[in-house]
Image (cartoon, rainbow, N blue to C red):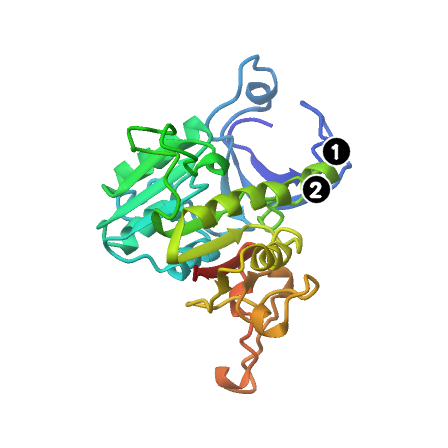
Amino acid sequence: MKEGDEVSVYSDIEGKCKRGATQFDGTKIFIGNGISELSRSEIFCSQSPIKGKGIRMTDPVYLSPSFDNVLPRYIFLQNLPSAVVSYVLNPQPGERVLDMCAAPGGKTTHIATLINDQGEVIAIDKIANKVEKIKQNASVLQLRSIQAYCFNSTKAVRQDSSDNPEGTGPPFPPESFDRVLLDAPCSGMGQRPNMAGALSLKELTSYQPLQRKLFRAAVSLLKPGGTLVYSTCTITLSENEEQVAWALQTFPGLQLQAQDPHIGGVGMAGAGLPPDQLQLLQRFDPSLAVPCDLSDGTPEDKDWTLPANTDTIGFFIAKFVKTS
């Protein structure tokens, strides 16, 4: 291959293609055609990491353009369910809102936008460079209501006055937030495209106990009458409906609430939740997408139960109110 050659591009699904291989018979997926910007020797004979554009795609299978740095002060690209979450939380101007696992800040900045930057949006993440990303995104979007902290959200509840005596930042006093978003760390099995997963069973099952620790902190930090939204970008029953069933049993003061907008599917059976509670949950599942043939009728005649599943990631949302 020389610079300027027409080439076809494939994705090595199992990651088994060796550097510099002249042929490959493993599992692969066609991505598209393009023009090489580098020669084979520039790619494979270099001793330093290759950076920049290797192939200029002229005939890609996927036609979505890049939105990087497109009107950065005005646009923050998110998946559909990620944007729905903030609307379900429904923050109001003047309120104090907590985003417990906030990086990289898409939902945080959306919340600040929905309250017209009038109020207080606290964003927490335990990885320092991710917190800097939150601050950077808030700065680019010129949102002043956001305060970001590097902290472990499982320890975000102040136990006594000796914890954080200055009173700024975490840990926070119990019942000090009007609304809490817990977009929890999860197995991420709803993300697409994800052609192969390397999760072990041990790692997969490790998320449920962590999510419950975070949930306990979220309930403690929420004011009576406040709203708690729990969400994940995974499709497992154990991290979604089972967590809802556990929460309702563990915290009698929590009540499930209807969601607006509700454009995904309902909850999955199998966690012991009754049908009326499953209707209150919102689940986006691409595997359940059903093509709609409109050739023999109007849209009103068709089943639009799951229209939002057609082109999005797998996602789950539950909304609670704390009555006491």
- Give the position of the N terminus as an image quadrant: top right
Q: What's the residue at 57%, 79% (across, down)?
A: 303
Residues under numbered marks 2 and 1 in contact, where contact means CB atoms less than 8 Å apart: yes
- Dot 1 lies on which element? loop
Q: Is residue 62 above or below residue 8?
A: below
- Give the number of the disc on residue 217: none
Q: Position of residue 103 (x, y in %)?
A: 43, 38
Please name the residue that numbered disc 2 is placed on. 28
Task: Determine the residue located farthest toward the right in the rendered image.
Answer: 25
Viewer-side residue, 3 vs 157: 157
Tell me the mark number nearer the camera, choosing from 2 and 1. 2
- Please name the residue shown 37% across and 38% down the image: 172
Q: Nearer the viewer, residue 74 or 147?
A: 147
The three-letter amino acid code for the residue at tag 1 is Phe
Please name the residue shown 66% across and 56% down the image.
237
| Rendered image quadrant of residue 30 | top right
Residue where numbered disc 1 is placed: 24
- Up-down relation of residue 152 to residue 207 (above or below): above
Residue at screen point 48% across, 68% down: 263
Q: Quadrant of the C terminus?
A: bottom left
* Left or right of 185 on screen, residue 189: right
Dot 1, crowdedness within 10 Å: few (<14), some or many (≥20)? Answer: few
| Secondary-structure class at tag 2 | strand
Residue 2 in picture, x, y percent from top left: 56, 26
Q: Amino acid at mark 2?
A: Lys
